């Protein structure tokens, strides 16, 4: 999606922000219409906090708080209390010495990469051109932290060991986004990931994982979270992606790194007075969603295969489900139609049938005009869908596309 850093945002299936235009009243009206359709749908592949009203979210947080902590305890002040409890929980889950809570993942990674630049003496970060800092952060790594970025590959996948080992210039940190969202939530194999990390070590570079969605990587890798995190020198995880939290992130690593990161967090304005709503929502998400992720990942494969079958049976012509099978519980679907036409068909299907198959569609950043994609997420609500349900929904969706 081009020029994301020049736009404000709408919501994707997992609450992730995606672009819409500044001051566009029609876009605002369409956004509210979509949210209303998603909320009222009888069947949907993923229900997210975006689909719930403010009152519903407050009620859910109040009800869930008692399941993860004592509501009568004092609220947090500058990172103690329930925030410190969350940090300890994350360090334990990832098997690291320590972890620090951050209000945003952008800040967490800014701090991590800045710390590594100082420690390695090299301010160059090797990462993918589709990685979050390059596409979604308005050039923050250079503008705020004075870092420089280079790209070992531009292929729509993470770099290979040879690409890292043979890259023509030095870098201090290799950042790997797991999974690489904008390429289709793609992951390497475990053996490929081990080889890439080893190649970075051969170059005396440190390795940082952008693990905003690290939680759902374990199924493909066939490894537990501590073993995955142990490959890297630092790991960032998100609490609102996948886990359904309100906001917030954590940076995990050695005790000395996290101590330094806390200093930079304060300097960057991240030392907030109270953060208990975000911390509570994160703890609730860890308890409720994390154990279910393997079932989501497994069922995403069923949904993706049924989508492909449905498009074929309906005579859709060209389409792409990517990757097939999905590497996580999220994947892309591509069709040769204008994004607005597909978004309209999606919301109309939800309004007319009570079935929300797709959410918002986006124009491709490259390629011929009229090529669009959407992101599909399968979570608890999607587990009730059979392959036949998916195929039937595809047929209904395409009927509405044909009328555009």
Image: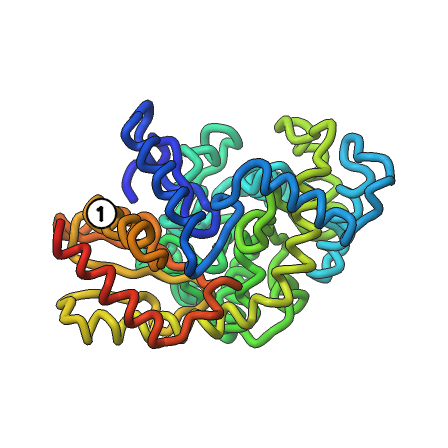
According to the picture, the residue beneath numbered tag 1 turns out to be: 339
- Left/right placement of residue 52 relative to residue 164 reads right
Q: Residue at x 75, y 42 (%)?
A: 83
User: Which residue sits at x=41%, y=53%?
Assistant: 41
Residue at image x 45%, y 50%?
Answer: 126
Most foreground residue, 140 or 150: 140
Visual colour scheme: rainbow
- In the displayed orientation, state which residue is furthest to the right: 73
Identify the residue at image location x=60%, y=47%: 245
**Whole-percent x, y for residue 121 in the image:** 58, 41
- Where residue 265 appears, as percent x and y from the top left, is 66, 33
Residue with the most extreme top position? 23
Q: Relative to 377, does residue 277 appear above or below in the rendering?
A: above
Up/down of 390 relative to 77, above or below: below
Looking at the picture, tell me which residue is in the foreground, 313 or 228. 313
How far from the left and from the top, in percent, is residue 135? 38, 42
Residue 206 seen from this side:
no
> Is residue 346 in sight in this rendering?
yes
């Amino acid at each position: 999606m081009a020029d994301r850093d020049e736009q404000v945002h709408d919501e994707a299936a997992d609450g992730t922000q995606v672009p819409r235009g500044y001051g566009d009243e029609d876009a605002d009206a369409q956004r509210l219409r979509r949210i209303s359709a998603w909320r009222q749908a009888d069947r949907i592949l993923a229900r997210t906090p975006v689909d719930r009203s403010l009152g519903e979210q407050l009620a859910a947080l109040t009800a869930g708080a008692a399941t993860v902590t004592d509501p009568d305890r004092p609220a947090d002040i500058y990172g103690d209390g329930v925030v410190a409890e969350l940090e300890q929980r994350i360090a334990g889950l990832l098997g690291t010495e320590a972890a620090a809570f951050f209000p945003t993942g952008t800040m967490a990674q800014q701090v991590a990469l800045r710390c590594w630049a100082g420690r390695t003496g090299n301010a160059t970060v090797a990462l993918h051109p589709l990685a979050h800092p390059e596409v979604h952060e308005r050039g923050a790594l250079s503008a705020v932290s004075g870092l420089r970025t280079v790209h070992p590959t531009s292929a729509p996948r993470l770099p290979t060991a040879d690409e890292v080992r043979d890259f023509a210039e030095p870098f201090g940190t290799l950042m790997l986004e797991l999974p690489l969202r904008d390429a289709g939530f793609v992951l390497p194999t475990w053996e490929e990931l081990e080889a890439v990390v080893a190649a970075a070590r051969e170059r005396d570079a440190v390795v940082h994982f952008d693990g905003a969605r690290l939680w759902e990587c374990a199924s493909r890798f066939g490894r537990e979270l501590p073993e995955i995190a142990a490959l890297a020198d630092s790991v960032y995880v998100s609490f609102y992606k996948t886990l359904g939290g309100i906001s917030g992130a954590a940076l995990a690593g050695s005790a000395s790194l996290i101590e330094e990161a806390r200093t930079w967090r304060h300097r960057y304005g991240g030392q907030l007075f109270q953060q208990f709503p975000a911390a509570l929502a994160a703890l609730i998400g860890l308890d409720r969603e994390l154990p279910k992720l393997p079932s989501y990942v497994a069922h995403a494969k069923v949904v993706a295969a049924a989508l492909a079958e449905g498009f074929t049976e309906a005579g859709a012509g060209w389409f792409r489900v990517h990757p097939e099978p999905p590497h996580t519980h999220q994947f892309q679907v591509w069709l040769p139609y204008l994004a607005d036409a597909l978004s309209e068909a999606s919301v109309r299907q939800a309004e007319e049938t009570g079935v929300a198959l797709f959410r918002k569609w986006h124009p491709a950043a490259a390629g011929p005009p009229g090529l669009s994609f959407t992101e599909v997420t399968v979570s608890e609500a999607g587990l009730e869908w059979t392959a036949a349900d998916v195929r039937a929904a595809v047929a209904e969706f395409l009927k509405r596309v044909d009328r555009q």
